Image (tube, grey):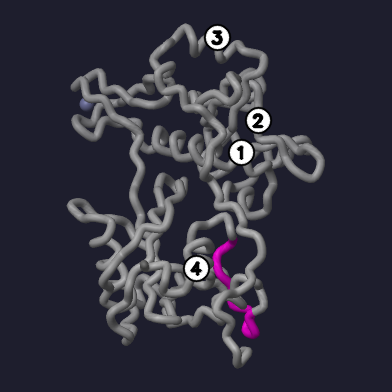
Amino acid sequence: MTANVPARFDLGAKPRLGYVASPLDRAAALRGDDAAMRAFDADPRAGGYVIGGELIVLKRDGERCDPLFAPHEARALGALRMAAFLGLIDGTPRFGFGLDPHAVEPLQSRGELKVADLRSIAVTGLVEAAHLPPLAEAKALIGWHARHGFCPNCGAPTQIALAGWRRDCKACGAEHFPRTDPVVIMLAISGERCVLGRSRRFAPTMWSCLAGFCEPGESIEEAVRREVAEEAGIACGKVVYFASQPWPFPSSIMIGCLAEARSENLVIDREELEDARWFTREELALMLKRQHPQGLTTPPPVAIAHHIIRSFVEDGADVLA
Ligand SMILES: [Zn+2]
């Protein structure tokens, strides 16, 4: 560590956050227009993302992969369970195609295809970055359908409706809409330091922001304070919003926040976390630049945690202003 801590740390150009800034117009008014949907399906420019469970099917195309399949190409891959209308890009329809997860395995041996999970696609840049937001939309939506085949109201089977944006129960008349689960992800800050934690699921060197689901009847600010208190034993005061990010694993939205830590003594919930500790801005800067002497790292730029940590390194406690 250097003795002179600069007021600002040169971290280079800001990287792009994953899954946000979709180029698609969702064109929600067209979802109930069956004639428009039939025309879109027959449109020779139409393309869609093929998703089977946690896996995405891609076409090999040089160094990168092409994630788009024409509707007839998607149907030729195997048993399609559903198609959802994601929206329009420059007037061209985009779909999400839900493939039976059992139909994905035989595709893995086909040389012209590549099958990968969305996290590795995003982290390795396997497809152009502009595909990540509609891929997130498709994965979260198709995953919701896969888990909602039966009516939560009466237990009868439900049917897909509104081009993939609703499920209807004919037995009790209930209409069910795709859900998104809010998760708070936050950095608790005290002066020049902040708290990071490690889940047992993480790569051995990685440390990240604490995070947890919002509970019913709870505001975002309350969820932030509760999660930091439960996982790390730290009391927090002021909470400020940073940014949000769709996180389709399976259907979350990550709500990024910074919080003012009002206590110092860590009491770690070892059920939730393998470890947690305080980090200085200087140490975080080395982690972001992949120059930490012990090889410690932050999550990659595709994840909002990277951007929350970076904002604290760049602006210090001013991020709470
Ligand atoms: Zn029902």
Image-based side of 130 in relation to 224, left or right: right
Read off the residue under disc 4.
Answer: 309
Circle 4 or circle 1, nearest the eye: 4
Estimate the spatial distance between the alpha carbons at disc 4 and disc 3, rounded to whole Å. Answer: 46 Å
Mark positioned earlier in the residue sequence (2 or 3): 3
Estimate the spatial distance between the alpha carbons at disc 2 and disc 3, rounded to whole Å. Answer: 18 Å
Residue under the point 59% across and 32% down: 49
Estimate the spatial distance between the alpha carbons at disc 1 and disc 2, rounded to whole Å. Answer: 9 Å
Helix, strand or loop at mark 4: helix
Q: Residue reaching furthest right?
A: 62
Q: Where is the N terminus found, in terms of image quarters?
A: bottom right
Circle 1 or circle 2, nearest the eye: 1
Q: Residue reaching furthest bottom?
A: 3
Mark positioned earlier in the residue sequence (4 or 1): 1
Is 295 inside the magenta-drawn segment? yes
Helix, strand or loop at mark 2: loop
Tell me where the magenta segment starts and ends, as one range. 292-300
Q: Position of residue 117 (x, y in %)?
A: 59, 48
Read off the residue under disc 2.
Answer: 68
Read off the residue under disc 1.
Answer: 131
Number of marks drawn = 4
The amino acid on which the numbered mark 4 sits, given as a three-letter code, is Ile
